[in-house]
Image: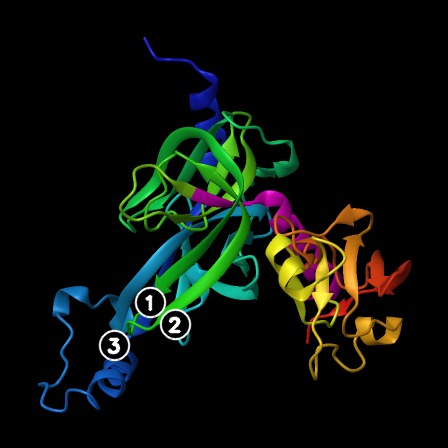
Amino acid sequence: MKEKSRIITTIKKVIPAVVSIVITKRLRQLEEELRERFYPFYPLLPPIQIPREMIGPGGRIRIGGGSGFIFDSSGLILSNRHVVSEPNVEYTVITHDEKRYPARVLATDPTTDVAIIKIEPKKPLPIVKLGDSNELELGQTVLAIGYALGIFRNTVSKGIISGLSRAIVARTKGLLLEESEERLKGLIQTDAAVNLGNSGGPLVNVFGEVIGINVAAVIGAENIGFAIPINTAKKTLASFKKYGRIARPFLGVRYLTINKQVQQELKLPVGYGALIIKARGAIVLGSPADKAGLLPGDIILECNGKKISTKKTLSDHLEEFNAGDKIELTVLRGTEKFRIKITLAERP
């Protein structure tokens, strides 16, 4: 007798929209880059030769991979920026029915690690529904789907939401062993297994709605994975649809987040807020902050009535808005408290 459950039904519903992303580079180009990277330090190395078994059709070498999911039947796919950030490579998307499509990267956002890529199918593709990550609760059942280890396509793991609003520093290593570091905030923590190659795949609820994009796992720990909330990706999509690119909000101040220690050391009247530092260039000329008349030494206490603190910094508040949005800041200048309205610009 076949088992019947909501989980199995959900998997069958979602998997047709999950894709594998394969990254390849031409053999001659790869050999040249490796030579430029290592020969200055190891001049006595023998000529670099790539094993024949690694060489694919057209003289291409597979150098990596990841996952993604189709959210628009015309071929729009969400994934991670770090999956598609390698320069001078070719991306191929493999759909559930084994069809291969050349892919192009439309936009990437280093702040959220979200990427939008596009393929050109001849007919509409199956899609997944984007859910609401603001409604998540601890203990909620979730499924992580992706291209585990770059080998096992459509791998499914089940778990729960273990934490919300997590912050991590994610480190990735490129083809030529160069390392990059990203600071990601507001993440969903899950104990559903998230492995290398799962990056960019969907984290879904039991109803088959995407509530996150798998992004990272803690190496050396058991079942501690992280996903970008889908509402963060929705904001990225909204910006792309409006501007044709990802436009991040920009205020134009350099600040120090106040805590009790900072308050005591600087003898400030409050123990929270964002102190605009007293330094040259602390307020960018021509920025929204400059136009609104903010000054070094001002303390921004609230954004749209919500307190600014170490738990939710000014940057965290600003990330909830888009370029062009109007916000209201509560400011303390000396002993005077006042409110000002500011229209956010696009980050240069």
Q: CA distance from mark 1 to mark 2?
A: 6 Å
Quick one: label 3 or label 2, which is nearer the N terminus? 3
Mark nearer the N terminus (1 vs 2): 1
Task: Write down the region rendered in magenta.
Answer: 226-249
Q: Examine the image and state in which quarter residue 112 appears.
A: bottom right
The residue indicated by pointer 2 is 89
Residue shown at 37%/42% (left/top)?
Answer: 194
Looking at the rendered structure, the secondary structure element under dot 1 is: strand
Q: Which residue is mark 3?
A: 27
Is residue 122 at all visible to an observer of this figure? no
Q: Position of residue 180 (x, y in %)?
A: 40, 68
Q: How many numbered tags mark residues here?
A: 3
Closest to the observer: 261 or 63? 261
Secondary structure under tag 2 reads loop
- For image coordinates 21% across by 83% down, the residue present is 38
Pick whichever, 325 or 53, lies toward us. Answer: 325
Pointer 1 local density, CA inside 10 Å: few below 14, some 14–19, many at least 20: many
Q: In the picture shown, does residue 4 fall above or below 268?
A: above
Q: Which kind of residue does numbered mark 3 sit on?
A: Leu
Callout 2, which amino acid? Answer: Val
Q: Which residue is mark 1?
A: 24
- As for residue 347 lying within the magenta part, the answer is no
Image quadrant occupied by the N terminus: top left
